[in-house]
Image: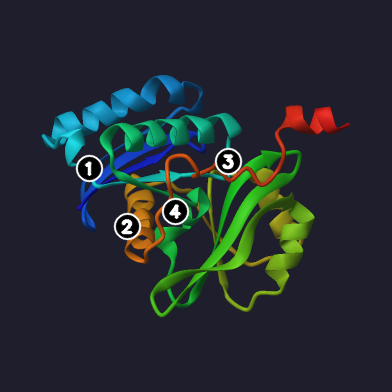
Amino acid sequence: MYTLGIDTAGDMAVVSLMDNLKLVSEIYVDYSKNHSVQLMPMIESLFGMTGINKEEIDLISVGKGPGSFTGMRIGLATAKALSYGLGCEIVGVSTLKAMAYPFIDNDNFVLAIHDARNRRIFYGGYCAINDKIVDIIPENVESFDYIIEELRKLDKKITIVGKDNQLFKEALESNNIDYYWKEIILRGQSIARLGVEKHNSGQIDHYNTVLPSYIKLSQAEQNLKK
């Protein structure tokens, strides 16, 4: 089974191609301003390098955020159009969970984060139980102070994954939170692997119904409500 992984929810655009759970190829570009321009050429390059035809794709796994509102929509719109055009299945997966995926083990708690500005972050907390990734802290967006109080309740080693956030680091250290920070490159294969796992468990989405994980209102919507 060939799986195409796509994510543009953060600063990085990633695409990957997997044959079952074996990585065939992946491409990533760390420049969020050009996702709409870069994504389709990245996908075309992926197929060109591997010699695999788009028509051979069985499944598209797309990161649905949380993250940049515009970025999420770009990735999802592209994935949904390809799913419709190619007649292949589609699943939406968590971008935060994909960030945490390579660092999960049975002794470790992983907090994946994405900056939401104004001393707030998108976050989700995960660990492994019987070698399967499990949500421990549901994905949300909250203030530094709220998240730090949640971390105080844990009795596990804490690994934080995400782009460097000096303000959040300072808040953690001033509150004596013991942590290890891993600034990561989101791997396209993590998006694809989560999609394969979701597909194999019988959880299939549809190109008409898979939606971004906004979590909070956009700034325009917040201003409108006021």
Spatial CA span between label 2 and label 3: 22 Å
The answer to which quarter of the image holds residue 75 is top left
Q: Which residue is drawn at the image coordinates 46% and 27% (left, top)?
A: 31
Where does residue 114 sit, x and y in percent of width and height?
Answer: 59, 45
Other-residue count near label 2 (Cα within 10 Å), few / some / many at <14 / 14–19 / ≥20: many
Disc 1 marks a residue whose amino acid type is Ile
Q: Is residue 130 above or below residue 124?
A: below
Where does residue 210 sit, x and y in percent of width and height?
Answer: 49, 44
* Secondary structure found at label 2: helix
Camera-side mark, 2 or 3? 2
- Between disc 2 and disc 4, whose residue precedes? 4
Spatial CA span between label 3 and label 4: 13 Å
Disc 4 marks a residue whose amino acid type is Ala
Q: Farthest residue in the right direction?
A: 226
Please state if 205 lies on the left or on the right of 199 as rendered: right
Q: Is residue 3 above or below residue 137?
A: above
Spatial CA span between label 3 and label 1: 26 Å
User: Quick one: quadrant of the C terminus?
Assistant: top right
In this orientation, which residue lies closer to the viewer: 178 or 34? 34
Query: Can you identify the residue that label 4 sits on?
Result: 98
Other-residue count near label 3 (Cα within 10 Å), few / some / many at <14 / 14–19 / ≥20: many
Camera-side mark, 4 or 1? 1
Query: Can you identify the residue that label 2 sits on?
Result: 196
Query: Can you identify the residue that label 3 sits on?
Result: 67
Query: Can you identify the residue that label 1 sits on?
Result: 57
Disc 3 marks a residue whose amino acid type is Gly
- Between disc 1 and disc 2, whose residue precedes? 1
Camera-side mark, 2 or 4? 2
Does the image show residue 208?
yes
